[in-house]
Amino acid sequence: MTKVSLTIDNRKVETDKESTILQAARLIGVNIPTLCYMKLDDLNFENKPGGCRICVVEVEGAKNLMPACKTECRDGMVVHTHSVRVVNARRTVLELILSDHPAECLICARSGDCDLQSLAQQLGIREIHYQGEQSHYKSDQSPAIIREMDKCIMCRRCETICNDVQTVGTLSAINRGFRAVVATPFETDLDHSSCTYCGQCVAVCPTGALTEKDYTRKVIEAIVDPSKTVVVQTAPAVRAALGESFGMSPGTLVTGKMVAALKKLGFDYVFDTDFAADLTIMEEGAEILDRLTRYFDGDSNVKLPILTSCCPGWVNFLEYHFPEMKDIPSTAKSPQQMFGAIAKSYLAQKIGVAREDLFVVSVMPCLAKKYECTREEFFINGDPDVDVSISTRELAHLIRNANLHFEGLTDEEFDHPMGESTGASVIFGTTGGVIEAAVRSAYELFTKKELKKVDFEELRGMEGIRKAEVDFDGVLLKVGIAHGLGNARKLLEEIKSGESDFHAIEIMACPGGCIGGGGQPYHHGNVEILKKRQKAIYKEDKGKAIRKSHENPYIQQLYREFLGEPLSHKAHKLLHTCYFDRKKKIEF
Amino acid sequence: MDLINSPEKLQQLKTTLVNQKKAKLKLEHEGGRIQVKVSMSTCGIASGAGEVKDFFEEKLDLENINADIVSTGCMGYCYAEPTVEITLPGGEPVIFSNVDMVRAGELVNDFIKERKSAVNTIPHKSRKPGGAVEKGKQYRIALRNCGFINPEDIREYIAAEGYDALRMALTEMTPDEVIEVVKKSGLRGRGGGGFPTGLKWELSAKAECRNEKFVVCNADEGDPGAFMDRSLLEGDPHSILEAMALCGYSIGSNKGVIYIRAEYPLAIERLKTAITQAKETQLLGSDIMGTGFNFDIEIRYGAGAFVCGEETALIHSMEGLRGEPGVKPPFPAEKGYKGEPTNVNNVETFANIPLILLMGAEWFSKIGTEKSKGTKVFALAGKINNVGLIEVPMGMTLREVVFDIGGGIRGDRQFKAVQTGGPSGGCLTVKHLDTPIDYENLIENGSMMGSGGMIVMDEDDCMVAVARFYLDFTVEESCGKCAPCRIGNKRLYEILDKITLGKSVKDDLSGLRNLASVIKETSLCGLGQTSPNPVLSTMDNFYDEYKAHVIDGDCPAGQCRALMRYVIDPHLCVGCTLCMRVCPVDAVSGEKKQVHSIDTSVCIKCGACIEKCKFGAISLQ
């Protein structure tokens, strides 16, 4: 690559010709402030519309100030990043942005964790010299995501991730000039749009314009209601990220502290969604085996590949964009819903509580889960299997509200029986994990041999689409993995066109899988955080005594005492579901 | 019409058509016919030219008079529409102004039948194309055919040397030679930027493409008060098609796209007709004139966003994306429509091309100033006597334009300023009257060439209100992508609005200037980078007026109502109570036959009292 040499703030720097001034400046420790710019390496996300103009710098010889995020380096370029002219312009532009932003920081969901607020702090803005009319838009309240577009600064990150990365196409800019804003087609609310509730728009939003719907109050009300027995389940990816909300370094596993906190919050039973993940493997694995056996026996009616179904964002995507393929995914419910169904039947029976008195809360890295638990097929006589789903961030708020010193908590253990889990279920939290867990069990059940090496490195990683072949004692199982809905779309198109001959495919809506979910602590564009969470997940797996789902003794007990065997009539009734053409369901 | 499947056929046809035309102009006994041309552009039609044309057709037919009635494009005299040009056999053409139905009847009787001498005519010496440049006179290159030929008849264009430049290029020149001529001519982009056209073509020619290159004609004319491109397309569509094909030949493209705003239905109609005729005769499409060169043109409609005149926004719009500009580089010449090299030129730029090739780069480069060659078409509007479409050599002074060609200020008022360059431009004042108009001088004086809107203002125009008017436009037309333009222009507008409403404070003046400069130097595209120009330029030239508003609470031009007070002159008031009775807010008080007075704190300045007062006793002060 051609090298160029330039001067930034009187210091020489040599860099690749294609790199921008922003990148070159970082090489010498000059951090030019940015606002709209965001790049997630490896995840195919780069938002640089050059719209906010915060990163403008002075390039000698250029008439106007140049955006550092978009301007490529040239040999001999002389750049000033903090001259009086630059600082005045930068501050004025920021003041302009602030002048069209509600000054509601005190009660904003993003307060303290907001890119715009940090920037105003960084530049030391104490007065807004240009005041005037502010934009007003109607607020959009869906079951999962709230859009308060008065707070939108038109950075377009949500638009880029929704269209370029997720290919969902819900959000795009509308109107001109001062009235320009990001909106859905025809300005419908999200619940009447193609939105999958993946929550990636929330994950990248720099302000409080896009946030999750907060259900913490409902949780507290249930806990203090003496007639309710409140059960909580926590998804695998939560323990790998929750610590960040308390200043712990990314990748710190806080399973024990999380359990301790939940117990102190007053939940009657603290269980693990991982238990349900093991259950998912039992059902989904059995389904895979069933389809595969029939396929290898020559049954041409078998639908292959089988697609995983534990990610509700992905299910929403399939139901809206590929309704003609709705009979391909596994019919197994997601772990969250399996947990709810078992809790409100088996567990209720076991602890002697009436179904309607049992209140199930889930803590998820995900916003689509909030929607998933409101789907009518997961209700029995008006009572949902899962009552409320809160995000990792909401759990952090609950913990802080309860005056708990999280970092100082002594580790505690999950309750039994639904707190016991295997390493296989833990890795559900990262891309490739579900399929690896399935392979661990399916191998033994298919080959009737013991699996010696449980780590399938070939299924791990961060590449958007991964393909691998797993040797099932002579039979090659062709496996595909996609994370991010844009990658999912590519695989689905391949299947549709008959190009691919996969047997099983795992799809996760969020880049990175659940560790990068829309409900996780904000990564602020730092992909390393996601990678550290992923490492933590694999570390937890490694540390587990049991690493194959079918070996979980409490799962075995559940089948013995209650379900019979995988795919039994009872299992079908409680643990399986079906999919709909969502386009038809959404009426304008 | 026969196919023109060889270069020779075009030449033969041209000779035949020119001869036919000449024959018509001969004396009556030699077979000459009366030629009646009616200016049928949008402005003419809106003034009733359609009816006038029908009238001439019916009337002359009824009277058995041998005449050809021809619709042409705009003749350029907007102040005198409908305009009709009549050429009697063997005579010189005479242009008649304001030809309504009554006058049309008179013309048939007096001028055509009785051959009485012509009255109410427009001197038209300056309309003739070619020849030497004369001081204070128009010079037509781009508008050479506009108002002369029937834009809906390809034969008239061919007779006027149409498609001859294309023939010449395809048969006698290499693509590089064509580019060389354009480069040497010194032609610069007429859309506003002033980028050397030949250089742009060269960049596109050198750029590597994956599948194909594109030639785009930017017909998204959007400046308020500008109608140069519309008139050109309505009056001479073939010249644009020919130029695009020439561009295609020289840069290696076979595909042209005209991006035109949908609000120009007549221009679209005439373009469509022209494209069909050119394709039917093999002057466009495959194997043009049998030379093996293919070039096709399609039309795309813009929804009327001003910012889509910016070339990257235009390309986004063509691609079906939101009409937002992108950061340059990469320039469209390298990576434009569909990611391919795309040469975007404005209508007027293209209109110059065929003549440059026919007459030579040297001829063209002799017209104009050192750095600005050729002519510029302006849409002259505002408080001027001869509102219209004009084309003048670069380097002409503002004085010549306003007073010689424009006929001076309407109502003998004082000249105050000329706004050029539309919302991106600025004001030129009395002190600039003798500045030669070219790209550099306009920029140096705080304005810009822009696409060619020229709005003349007199002493009654408040310059703060003028700046506010343009900002109102920019706020509406900003795409909203970058913060300084989206929010900054809104704030600029709000401050200006405050000033005109008498609600401003002294700090607003320095605030205005700082904000304007920040918007200029931080905005993403040309729209935002120039949108504060109307503010900065009026502040530079009319700072006293700003101060008067802010500090003295006074609008010297008497235009800002909020700063005015309604006052009753005690010497003129007879106490008739009429004003008292019409006042909707009871601001007027006084007894019958006593002098009345107006309570300014209650008055809403509706003006009802002034209208009613029979004694002229109420005035605005």
Image (tube, rainbow, N blue to C red):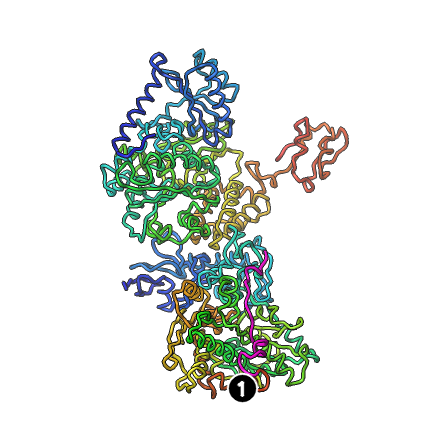
Q: Amino acid at mark 1?
A: Gln
Quarter of the image with the N terminus of chain A in it: bottom left
Residue A75 as seen in the image, left or right of residue A227: left
The residue segment tinted magenta is A564-588
Tell which subunit mark 1 falls on: A
Q: Quadrant of residue A27?
A: bottom left
How far from the left and from the top, in percent, is residue B319? 42, 50
> Between B14 and A181, which is closer to the camera in this rendering?
B14
Residue hosting label 1: A556
How far from the left and from the top, in percent, is residue B32? 36, 16
Q: Quadrant of residue A393?
A: bottom right
Residue A396 visible in the current orientation = no
Look at the picture and state if A356 lies above or below B394.
below
- Write the residue at 52% across / 77% down: A238
Q: Secondary structure at mark 1?
A: helix
How far from the left and from the top, in percent, is residue A53? 44, 57
> Between A8 and A486, which is closer to the camera in this rendering?
A486
- Write the residue at 30% across / 52% down: B209
